[in-house]
Amino acid sequence: MRQPLLTHEIGSLAKPNWRVKALRNQPLTDEDLEEARKWARRLDLLPDAEALFALLEKRQGFSREEKRQLVRWASRMAVRLLEKAGLDVVYDGEQHRVEMYEYPIRRIQGFVFRGHVRSFDNKYYRKAAVVERPRVEKPYHLEEYQTIAGFATRPVKIPITGAYTLVDWSFDEYYLQQVPIGTREGLERRKEARRAFLQDMAREVIYPNLKALVDAGAQFLQIDEPAATTHPDEVPDFVQATIASVGDLKDRVFFGMHICFSDYSLLFPHIRDLEGVIHEMHFEYANRDSREPGVSPEVRVGYTATLNLIKDTNFIIGLGVLDVHTDFIEPVELIRDRILYALEVVQDPNRIYVAPDCGLRTRTWDVAFAKLRNMVEAVQQVKAKLGI
């Protein structure tokens, strides 16, 4: 899985309207059917997709099995989109999942949903409480991996939400139940309870899922931890939970980690304990950067500070080069210069992988595809310049 300037997409893509509506039991429109036909043509999936079109003509009242078929088709199309964009490693953009929190929590014993809470802007998610020691009876990403691997023509990456984020985004009604409130002793016991929750999630939930994927043949696994720096004093606990999550699998496959939109300085020096456990550390850069071409520090303002933090580690640097929060299609030249600047700082193309800042789920497939195509072309230009 190691190669200079390898390209991949971080994890999420938008779900097609026909897939979303069908699973929500909403009737499909002519526009939804045309969307399916448009992307089948663009992705060279005709005439196989005639089976999809025939199913979509039903428009509503899909059975459970028919919904499974639609999810499989959305997955196949998303994988083909990334392959056609030219990425080296592909995924299906979470077509099998609700999103990165609710999907796993639904499949972990010991949690009960308590209702919707606001995450940001007018976005909400269903927040759960842990009410007993968590565990999994069945790995919840295994079928997804096997499905994707069945039709992907390039290496497959499977992302999994990490222990710390699942813990931080949940209510704790189990581990804190014996902790007194308002005392110094209670504060210390609260920290101990939090660590126990993290370690149980790491060992009883995340590790079994990762092991099942490794045993099934997965070669590239990504742990997503957007909450890693939410509580700076807990960064050492996040690191220890990651070590417990990977366990004895660290030498069997390639592990990446994605942490986005954070003050990355808070991770250091603790994150260095993950060297040799996590191979690629992917951060967001483009969202902080200017849109001007060039390779000077004055222009590449989104890259200098973070690259200087991580350049002396042993991590492969996952370089975010696409801003996922805008429909702006980054020109090839801009992406190329971002990569070239990173190379000037790091001095080793084998230590840089290239990807968007984060998942592209808030962008349309048209925008996501255009961004990714330009990213791949920029990498090709850099490789040509370097003679690799």
Image: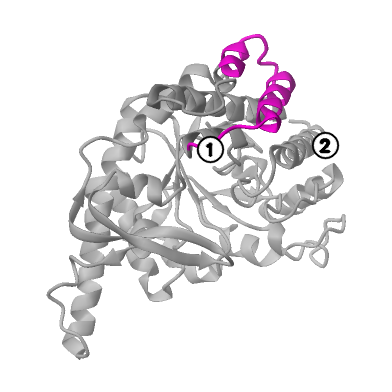
Name the residue located 59 percent from the left edge and 67 percent from the top edge: 121
Asked if 190 appears above or below 164 in the picture, the reply is below
Q: Secondary structure at mark 1?
A: loop
Q: Position of residue 39 (x, y in %)?
A: 70, 26
Q: Position of residue 268 (x, y in %)?
A: 48, 67
Q: Please report contact status of discs 2 and 1: CB closer than 8 Å, yes or no.
A: no
176 vs 1, left or right, is: left
Q: Position of residue 254 (x, y in %)?
A: 45, 37
Q: Decide which of 96, 293 is in the foreground and name it.
A: 96
Q: Of label 2 and label 1, which has the lower sequence position?
A: 1
Q: What secondary structure is the stretch in magenta mostly built from?
A: helix
- Verify whether residue 319 appears in magenta: no
Q: Position of residue 248 (x, y in %)?
A: 28, 41
Q: Which residues are magenta?
A: 25-54
Mark 2 or mark 1, whichever is nearer to me = 1
Name the residue furthest top. Answer: 47
Name the residue located 71 percent from the left edge and 32 percent from the top edge: 31
What amino acid is at disc 1?
Gln
Q: Quadrant of the C terminus?
A: top right
Q: Which color scheme did the rendering employ for the protein?
A: one colour
Name the residue located 76 percent from the left edge and 50 percent from the top edge: 327
Using the rendered image of the protein, determine whether residue 268 is visible from the camera's viewpoint. Answer: no
What amino acid is at disc 2?
Lys
Q: Which label was assigned to residue 385? A: 2
Q: Which label was assigned to residue 26? A: 1
Q: Decide which of 77, 196 is in the foreground and name it.
A: 77
Q: Secondary structure at mark 2?
A: helix
